[in-house]
Image: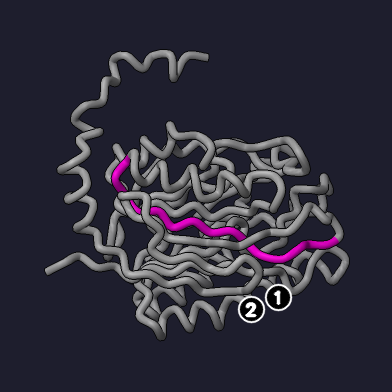
Amino acid sequence: MPRIVKSGLIQMSVPLSEGDGTIAEIKEAMINKHIPFIEEAASQGVQILCLQEIFSTPYFCPGQDSDWYAAAEPIPGPTVERMQELARKHQMVMIVPIYEKEQPGVLYNTAAVIDADGTLLGKYRKHHIPHTSGFWEKFFFRPGNLGYPVFETRYAKVGVYICYDRHFPEGARALGLNGAEIVYNPSATVAGLSQYLWKLEQPAHAVANGYFMGCINRVGTEKPWDLGQFYGSSYFVDPRGQFVATASEDQDELLIADLDLDLIDEVRSVWQFYRDRRPESYGLLTAP
């Protein structure tokens, strides 16, 4: 029997932003906007669903307003627990990226991974934190410190890499070495900066490591920051670097694709990148 996994990505614009209400109200509006899309994913048989980077808030990093620290919450905490209930209800694995508060003043850009029975399997914390061109993330996030975990969910072995991480092939390789079959990259990126890289780097990671990737970008513009247009174009790519499905540039959308995990073994039997690696010669990669 082929190992076919039905996976979904949700790209979303914000219903409320800074100045439209309290941070609690903004978060609640964004979560409530996602619920019908999550329910639709379940109705279409999605087995693994990934949400976008810090899905419950605007991308507030173009500003440097410490009020947004109040948007962070623990994992487990209220938002993740709500998603655990939905995962359990629909027997659906969920990757839930939120602003995490480990303790006062210790905040991370994190994705929680929830299994189909609602169990919180663990979390990935974004490693590479940009601080340039309106992406002032070091003001808000500490660098991740949990390594590159791969989570054995009911349906597949899943890894997570968040937004700016995608510019660094080292972590993408580590996820492959740790056994990932699908790597999800929830992002927030705008036209005019890295759009030319959007469909280059992640297909290259998929090919170099012989796994599937699900890549998400939000849509719309977000006031008051006017960083630019989030151009959507979320997609799935297979281990040959071929696009399986691609979303629109400007619409809220649930993107669904069937991923044939048997293709991983087929591709790796031809391209023996793991056999032919020379880790003893790569010391320069970990030098300061």
Kindly identify which residue carries mark 1: 29
Q: Is residue 212 magenta?
A: yes
Viewer-nearest residue: 177 or 96:
177
Image vertical order of residue 111 relative to residue 88, above or below: above
Residue found at x 52% / y 44%: 125
Amino acid type at circle 2 is: Asn
Residue under the point 43% across and 69% down:
8
Q: Is residue 9 left or right of residue 181?
A: right
Foreground of the two, 52 or 239: 239
Q: Which residue is mark 2?
A: 32
Q: Tell me if residue 281 comes above or below residue 4 in the rendering.
A: above
**Which residue is drawn at the image coordinates 60% and 52% (left, top)?**
100
| Residue 146 as seen in the image, left or right of residue 173 | right
Q: Quadrant of residue 157?
A: bottom left
- Count neighbours of disc 1 (C-alpha within 10 A) and say few if under 14, some if 14 to 19, many if 20 or more: some
Q: Quadrant of residue 279?
A: top left
**Amino acid type of disc 1?**
Ala
Where does the image place residue 40, in percent across and percent down from the top left?
48, 83
Q: Secondary structure at mark 1?
A: helix
Place of residue 94 in the rendered image (x, y in percent of width and height, measured from the top left): 43, 66
Residue 118 in sight from this viewpoint: no
> Horizontal and vertical percent for residue 135?
73, 43
Query: Disc count in the image?
Result: 2
User: CB of mark 2 within 8 Å of CB of mark 1?
Assistant: yes
Residue 90: quadrant of the picture:
bottom left
The answer to whether residue 161 is above or below residue 234 is above
Q: Is residue 32 magenta?
A: no
Q: Judging from the image, what secondary structure is the residue with disc 2 in?
A: helix
- Please give left or right for residue 20 compared with residue 215 in the image: right
In the shown orientation, is residue 144 left or right of residue 176?
Answer: right
Residue extent of the magenta highlight: 209-223
